[in-house]
Image (cartoon, helix red, strand yellow):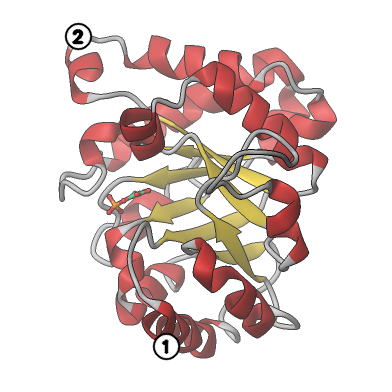
Amino acid sequence: MRKKIVAGNWKMNKDYSEGLSLFSEVLNMVKDEVRGEQQVVVCAPYIHLHSLSALAKGTNNVFVGAQNAHQEASGAYTGEISTGMLKSVGVEYVILGHSERRQYFGENNELLAKKTNTALANDLKPIFCIGETLAERESNQHFDVIKTQLAEATFHLSAEDFSKLVIAYEPVWAIGTGVTASSAQAQEIHAFIRSEVAAKYGAEVAENTTILYGGSCNPGNAAELFAQKDIDGGLIGGASLKSRDFVDIVKTFN
Ligand code: PEP
């Protein structure tokens, strides 16, 4: 059975003490709620990762993730963080391909393919983001964009390695805008992603691939989105910054 995940992406928010408080509140509220194939992942800025991993250790199904990592294993890359460093402080997941990284830091599919390889080599699980812009949707290119992002950044992987990825469908027009994809729009793309994975890796890999929805997901719309057949949870930005909202989204899991 595939994993069901609610992942928070704090982006560049929360100083050290604010982050500790937020994570502690979330942990206290979710640790007895999340079971079986369900997981909660909190993707925080680097300064938090060591402390949050220590807090999450020994809890059931709560993990810490980073929001980026470098494509090289080590070296003269001032200011960067390697996947091995992340692993060494207990990080389990890393977001790759977020639209903000693509837009503001020029990350393209070729670079993201390298980052994916390096993350997997260090036993980090990528939460790999794909999604179309508003202009691409309005010109009916959204299926092609998704197909290309998947193919160029992830389809070089072996089936075994691809199975370690979590895919997040994040329409760029829905991120941080308050505009959510309708559950029908999201389900349509999720089903398409699963069919692309099936065509490349076979039905079993596709059935076991966790595909998250991200884009203005909140306690009011999560239940309907997560009830869709091919939506296995969410990647949550703004609503992950308030413990009550994030936990309410976690609780819609079932
Ligand atoms: C995100 O940044 O991944 C995201 C989905 O943000 P928001 O929930 O704020 O739209």
Where residue 26 appears, as percent x and y from the top left, is 46, 82
Q: Is residue 164 visible?
A: no
Q: CA distance from mark 1 to mark 2?
A: 44 Å
Q: Which residue is drawn at the image coordinates 45% and 70% (left, top)?
A: 250
Where residue 193 appears, as percent x and y from the top left, is 52, 25
Q: First in sequence, mark 1 or 2: give its number.
A: 1
CA neighbours of label 1 inside 10 A, class few (<14), some (14 to 19), many (20+): few
| Badge 1 amino acid | Ser
Side (left or right) of 145 relative to 151? left
Where residue 179 appears, as percent x and y from the top left, is 16, 44
What is the tally of numbered marks visible in this picture? Answer: 2
- Residue toward you, 197 or 20: 20
Q: Is residue 78 above or below residue 41?
A: above
Side (left or right) of 197 relative to 179? right
Q: Is residue 254 above or below residue 212?
A: below
Residue 238 lies in quadrant: bottom left
Q: Name the secondary structure under disc 2.
A: loop
Side (left or right) of 108 relative to 156? left
CA neighbours of label 2 inside 10 A, class few (<14), some (14 to 19), many (20+): few
Side (left or right) of 191 relative to 135? right
Q: Is mark 2 within 8 Å of ligand 1?
A: no
Q: Which residue is drawn at the image coordinates 52% and 90% (left, top)?
A: 28
Q: Is residue 179 visible?
A: yes
Q: Name the secondary structure under disc 1.
A: helix
Q: Is residue 199 above or below residue 3?
A: above
Q: Which mark is residue 139?
A: 2
Where residue 212 appears, as percent x and y from the top left, is 48, 45
Mark 1 or mark 2, which is nearer to you?
1
Which residue is label 1 attached to? 21
Q: Is residue 108 above or below residue 241?
A: above
| Badge 2 amino acid | Ser
Q: Which residue is drawn at the image coordinates 19% and 24% (left, top)?
A: 134
